[in-house]
Image: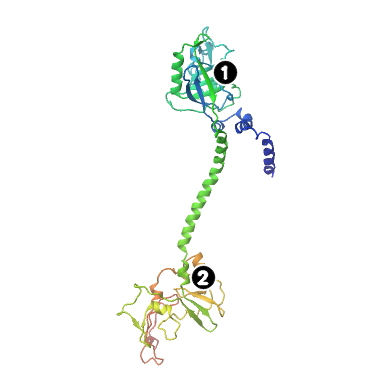
Amino acid sequence: MLRFLAIPLVLCQLVPIIRAHPVDWLRKFSSNTREDSSWLWGWAWASDGTVSVVDRSPPVTFLARPASFGSELDDPLLGYVIPLSSFTAPCVYNTTADTSSPLRPDPVQGCPDLCALGSHEPDPAESWIALVQRGGCPFVEKARQAQRLGAKAVVVGGDSDNPDALLNMYSERDSSDVTIAATFIKYWDYAELSSLIHASNTTHSGLKTLSLLLSTQYSAWEWYSPIITFVVILLLPSLLTFITLIVHRLRAARAAQRDRAPESIVHNLPWRVFTGAGWEKHEPPYMPSPDSAPRSGTQNTDPEQGLPCSGPQMLNNPSTSHDCEQLPSWVDEQVECAICLEMFVKGDHVRVLPCYHMFHMSEVDEWLIHKKKLCPVCKMDVTRSHSGAQQLECAPDVSQDGSEGHVEASAAATERTPLLNSSPERNA
């Protein structure tokens, strides 16, 4: 409940400053957090800038990247660039320091502690920019050393191991004491800038130098960068979960579709109407295919009419009393639906599956089309042809007195078929 109340309060505080330029109000929003900025915050707010030698025609410009610590360059900074190695050396009290210390003074790399050497030293009243190289100590220590010597900014050049890397300098610890601007340039740009200073005829306080202009370029889309980063990090797990769920649902839907029976097959299955005393049969017209047409030498003949009788014809034309169909005795004895467990009543429409099990038409159609294509009782697939259930043979009429002998009709084996058939002679 407190979280819902806190959201309107935060929005009310953002309304007065949201009318300003996006970059300005985002800076105001991040002013408190920048004092102790972490590497992630600095990466999100990274922006490109330039370092230009303005006393050359045309100006020589290098691509730079401001650090995540120190002051921001709201306006371009113009000053004299001076390498720290040209007028500094390790302090005297450090010559007897422990050699095992990870931080060793280095004028080229700008690692503390460095002291001015000789009479040539930049004027603290002038705006000058320190030039150092990467390595030896953290970036923030280089900035602290340049600030202690009086520089207004520091330019850090890359190293030869990663000559094309344009890094975003950050501090893992508190860097609120650093008040000068810091920027990073590539190794090749650092080497060219150093050579230009060495060949320069311009001096400042007896030190070779160049006029350098530091500027930060804020592109039109830059203020969106932290917002987009935050939104992507926030929504990425949900997006991946959503995509995984969609793929899972598609696979489940395809698997379920394979387990269901097509509507055309289900609607073509025979059905009956229970009249209370018997069954009224209703079956779709049978359209024989060339493969299912019976051969002349293997046709069975109706003994009463002399007409050929085949399995599919018997299955789809059982409405006459003199058919050659010989169904198991339990087929017509079914009086209960195995799905709803209710008795068949007069007028019920009952679907007959190829396995001869009967169910209420609406219930079994719903099961076959939307659930499974298997019979709820015997698990027979209704979409496949079953020779044992579809092909029946005709047999001549057996006289009541048994003078013509016993003729056994070859019907399909069902769940009610006995395992052993006893002959009449054995029963006698």
Q: Quadrant of residue 343?
A: bottom right
Camera-nearest residue between 415 and 321 = 321
**Mark sitting on residue 24:** none
Determine whether label 2 and label 1 are within 8 Å by CB: no
Question: Most extreme residue toward the front, as rendered?
Answer: 57
- Spot occupied by residue 142 in the image (x, y as percentages of width and height): 53, 20
| Left or right: residue 14 compared with residue 201 | right
Quarter containing the C terminus = bottom left
The amino acid at mark 1 is Lys
- The residue that appears at 47% across and 23% down in the rendered structure is 62
Q: Is residue 134 visible?
A: no
Horizontal arrangement in the rendering, residue 147 relative to residue 315 (left or right)? right
The residue where tag 1 is placed is: 152
Q: Residues within 10 Å of mark 2 (few under 14, many from 20)?
A: many
Q: How many marks?
A: 2
Query: Is any atom of residue 254 visible in this view?
Result: yes
Foreground residue among 188 and 107: 188
Label for residue 364? 2
